Amino acid sequence: MLIVMKPDATETDVERVLETIEKLGFKPHEMPGANRIAIGITGNNGAVDPTHFENLSGVADAIRVTKPYKLISKDLRPEKSIVKVGSAEIGGAELAIIAGPCALENPKQVFLVAEAVSKSGAKFFRGGAFKPRTSPYAFQGMGETGLKILAEVREQFDLNIVTEAMDEHGVDLVEKYGDCIQIGARNMQNFSLLRYVGKTRKPVLLKRGLSATLDELLLAAEYIMAEGNYEVILCERGIRTFAAHARNTLDLSIVPAIHNVSHLPVIVDPSHGTGRNYMVNPMARAGVAVGADGLIIEVHSAPEEALCDGAQALTPMQYLELVREVTAIHEALLPVNKIVESAIVA
Amino acid sequence: MLIVMKPDATETDVERVLETIEKLGFKPHEMPGANRIAIGITGNNGAVDPTHFENLSGVADAIRVTKPYKLISKDLRPEKSIVKVGSAEIGGAELAIIAGPCALENPKQVFLVAEAVSKSGAKFFRGGAFKPRTSPYAFQGMGETGLKILAEVREQFDLNIVTEAMDEHGVDLVEKYGDCIQIGARNMQNFSLLRYVGKTRKPVLLKRGLSATLDELLLAAEYIMAEGNYEVILCERGIRTFAAHARNTLDLSIVPAIHNVSHLPVIVDPSHGTGRNYMVNPMARAGVAVGADGLIIEVHSAPEEALCDGAQALTPMQYLELVREVTAIHEALLPVNKIVESAIVA
Amino acid sequence: MLIVMKPDATETDVERVLETIEKLGFKPHEMPGANRIAIGITGNNGAVDPTHFENLSGVADAIRVTKPYKLISKDLRPEKSIVKVGSAEIGGAELAIIAGPCALENPKQVFLVAEAVSKSGAKFFRGGAFKPRTSPYAFQGMGETGLKILAEVREQFDLNIVTEAMDEHGVDLVEKYGDCIQIGARNMQNFSLLRYVGKTRKPVLLKRGLSATLDELLLAAEYIMAEGNYEVILCERGIRTFAAHARNTLDLSIVPAIHNVSHLPVIVDPSHGTGRNYMVNPMARAGVAVGADGLIIEVHSAPEEALCDGAQALTPMQYLELVREVTAIHEALLPVNKIVESAIVA
Amino acid sequence: MLIVMKPDATETDVERVLETIEKLGFKPHEMPGANRIAIGITGNNGAVDPTHFENLSGVADAIRVTKPYKLISKDLRPEKSIVKVGSAEIGGAELAIIAGPCALENPKQVFLVAEAVSKSGAKFFRGGAFKPRTSPYAFQGMGETGLKILAEVREQFDLNIVTEAMDEHGVDLVEKYGDCIQIGARNMQNFSLLRYVGKTRKPVLLKRGLSATLDELLLAAEYIMAEGNYEVILCERGIRTFAAHARNTLDLSIVPAIHNVSHLPVIVDPSHGTGRNYMVNPMARAGVAVGADGLIIEVHSAPEEALCDGAQALTPMQYLELVREVTAIHEALLPVNKIVESAIVA
């Protein structure tokens, strides 16, 4: 923490700040300047709350220096985490592809899509049984019936199941039927739910909230990990901005930003991130090129009949083309990734 | 819904759209233009999902026309709702002032503030027992012990208690000890929680999410009302934008926007909406001038020692000055409000 | 400037930073902490460019402390500036109201509106002769012919003329015919134009850009003042956010933020700031309540026939009602403003 | 245009809308629905201004349907434009790489970088002689002296010169010394300047404004083309959002969005788009993967000594690695691009 005093701060103002720092058990460092005084704080183990200082007389600004997270940090664990999801992994050398329909609608639809996903070589299947819908009058998902279909998909196609839970009851069910608990963007700061999944021993796919900063996303992961569950995968799925040509603005720069400070794997969702069928493939390519550990893609056997988010769903054919293209990019970058990794580890 | 065809759409494309509309049970209206064809849809009772059309060949755009909400709408209930909270009301001619500390910390602090709030003439007391904190390592609130202090405040000062619940367990407790259940910004689209409070019979103060649109806020209220609880108060508390001079951007234009389509009362939170002590009073004045039904204000007996959000808390003295100023504005506008109301009802 | 080193920075890294600071002629202050070292910089007269440090080995962050502006600052001039515009003033005790049509269309329209503006007691008339339109095919304004009409309005109604210039040629003409040169939001960082108006001796109304931060707005004013023209009035006119219920999000918190650091007057434009007729009056009230020095309001004799921005224009009758209401608020707050002013001066 | 009436609109309201449409010379199409009436408009050649209708009694909404641009549209020119810049092209099969320092500082720096750029196989050199700086006290560029150095670079290394002009005087000079006139983000809606470069016969690199929508960017290009200069290249360089982990949010989804409606080439600027050295290479890879026609990259011989934007500049070595990686991606996608192109033309 750095406290910057106003140019007209009095000696008494400065003394009060010094005392406050000492009262908190920290060490103040006075730095007199040409126009004003700044006071550094050391001796703190975590972040200092700036509100202890902001309203003191003569204080112009209280600037945070120490980051507030621990478990997600590369300071703690320099090598990248590889998260085991069912029989496969996310975060390793292989590109993880999670594909399937937005919402589970009926067994026929699910199996048609699962077949395409399986053929593509992907190892993960997605499909929502509980749907967080903006309107209470929209289709809310099949519930446990849907989860049972997913369990059959796993058995039949040897795909690992990623599916969303919206509350504690849902977590219990996903833990029973699935391989990875997805926490949706709207629940990224549902701290009670984060703590609850932190107590399970299933990996968690945590989606970035629509207006979440990097620090907020990392601290949401920290909530889960603080409860003892270290198997967390982050997911960029688009943020809310003024731009209206896509449903959300897919913020790919968060991928290198996360890899810069955290050991956690991060995947990209170009389906929700754009909301437009024709953008999914190009943005999936971009996601792989930027260095994401995987993709999550919506595929529907008949997008125009989808009960949810049909505008962004790919047909099985479009999806297979996407896999072909992102694989080409992933392979073109293999030597790069190896160099990066060794640079990071070193 | 209006379907706009591309200039080069074929007759087959147009026919497919017409068929799809009819298959959904609606009536298509073809409108040939100079360059392209548009097709209107009527006969639908609620909003039509544009995804049925967006990926059809030849379709340029599918534009929503019908709004997806019902119960919050002035179409349903033209006169403004007045919500009863304990022994007082929000939404009537009187300005509702809800004041108190961000977090409950100890009985002494709470009673000091409650005394100031009571003296100011306000009828509602706020104070968080469960705190949604960005970091798992920050102070998380006093829990039930805090709620018991609030119950004493009610008894001693005859103030009605507004306090936040973050999960079902919290809702049960707030129902027991408080008068109004606050749903925080980060839980605005926690749909399971919305449904749960919809089943209680306590009024709900619903805060706008950091990146929630007007429609999303109204539909979150609709979730609560669809379960049978019609006692909902909306709250603007600042949205997330690029602007960094305040912690959030208080979007006061949503107040007339809500009053334009909904009968629900709306209050303004200039404390979280700015995060800066010196901005709270001016923005509170602006909130009353724009026509809000009330204010929610953070007051702390010693802001620089606050465990949470001290930078925005007012001292009891600053708070009393705020009440004086907003009351002057409310009174200056009384004739205006009467005219507006009669214009709306007429 | 504060340089924060990484936890694993070496002694050599630290030395390189110290050397770089000394090479720039400043004084480094080393602050060893529990986990890492921070280095403060003093001796600089203005802001230090962080890019000198950000890419040095071992540096985690370079944090700005000194603000980069001078002439706009209250440090330089603690009392508020009052800007003379023609025969009247902006920034003093009186509320400045600038009203008129968005675009000048024909003499009849202009004179009808000018009559209403004059009757309302306002002292300033606005009307665009040069219109910055998003599309090259939209109406671009009457040019010099329009300015001549404005000159007649001044003569006939004794109103002071505020009108926009988009380029150097326009500035020359506005200087000739008008009393105040408006620089529009889209030109807020047209630095060549800012310098050009800085060389005139007419007051300048500088509108905040759609995505301008507080600092960028203040530095745009600094560009004008650095050329010798100190007569600058700032104007909040709405920023671009995700919120779509209004055309822009009027960010009223910038008014106290500006008054906190700068002596320049600031006015509010609720017409462009909302783009909705029914929001203009409530947001004008809020603008006055928050402490703005004035308002700029679009009035049209027949909004539905306007060639530009008709959706936000008030009829003369609506405008007169607005003046009545904002005057009531201004008067209710007169004692407040006097106290604030004396507090600031003291 | 589609006019949606309110549920309680009267017959007189509807008639007034019908009359207004006919008075404008268009054809109304009435569509009675279950709850309300909608009225379509055809017969218009361009976009209809919604403000003609929004304030009419009984009108709920006026929704735009026709896009307001012509010359940039694939409706006019279905095949992609290839823009000739000096001796090379942008928009064809080859990836265009424009590289060089942010600001020209001295001949030694410029020639060191030019050598690296030339070695990399890139065909375009960038470097600013006129710098739009937020602060009037920051380095403003070398002016004409800088342009003369650029002319030498062209001669010596056979590189084509792309450089920014901020005003008419600058345009004249860039026309004289350079091969392509860059219009910066802050001038994207400086309509006078757009018209001025529209009258030159040099290609124009038009950067997207920090808060520009897709339509605004396209219409800015339309301004240039409407004056007769069709050689326009668009550039995504990051938008302003709440996210602070990068200087701007690089919105790559605009690349497929532009290719979807326009024949103009589009390039990506990952240097300004991120402002962070370590993000430039990953985001450049993503830009190529998403389908951009080229990249513009900042390279500096000694980034830590740069007078401008050093934090994002690559060293020559980092730049060569970037070229190696983006080339690998471009080649991996060559078959894809061919298929896409033929699909678009077909």
Image (tube, coloured by chain):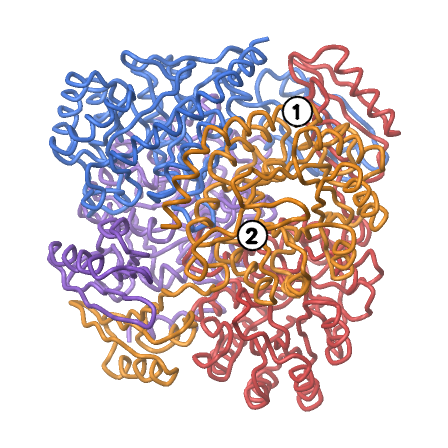
Chain colours: A red, B orange, C blue, D purple
Residue B239 visible in image: no
Residue beneath the point at 25% across and 32% down: D172
Farthest top residue in view: C346
Q: Nearer the viewer, mark 1 or mark 2?
A: 1
Of A303 and B42, nearer the camera is B42
Q: Secondary structure at mark 1?
A: helix
Q: Residues within 10 Å of mark 1 (few under 14, many from 20)?
A: some
On the rendered structure, is B61 left or right of B285?
left
Q: Residue at x 56, y 33 (%)?
A: B284
> Which residue carries the number 2 mark?
D281
Vertically, is D179 above or below A310? above
In the rendered structure, which amino acid carries the disc numbered 2? Answer: Asn
Q: Is residue B197 above or below residue A142?
A: above
Q: Residue at x 31, y 21 (%)?
A: C196
In the image, residue B134 sits, relative to residue D165, either above or below, namely: below
Q: Is residue A225 left or right of residue C182?
A: right
Residue C66 lies, in percent from the top left, at: 61, 22
The x, y position of residue D75, in whole percent, is 23, 65
Q: Secondary structure at mark 2?
A: helix
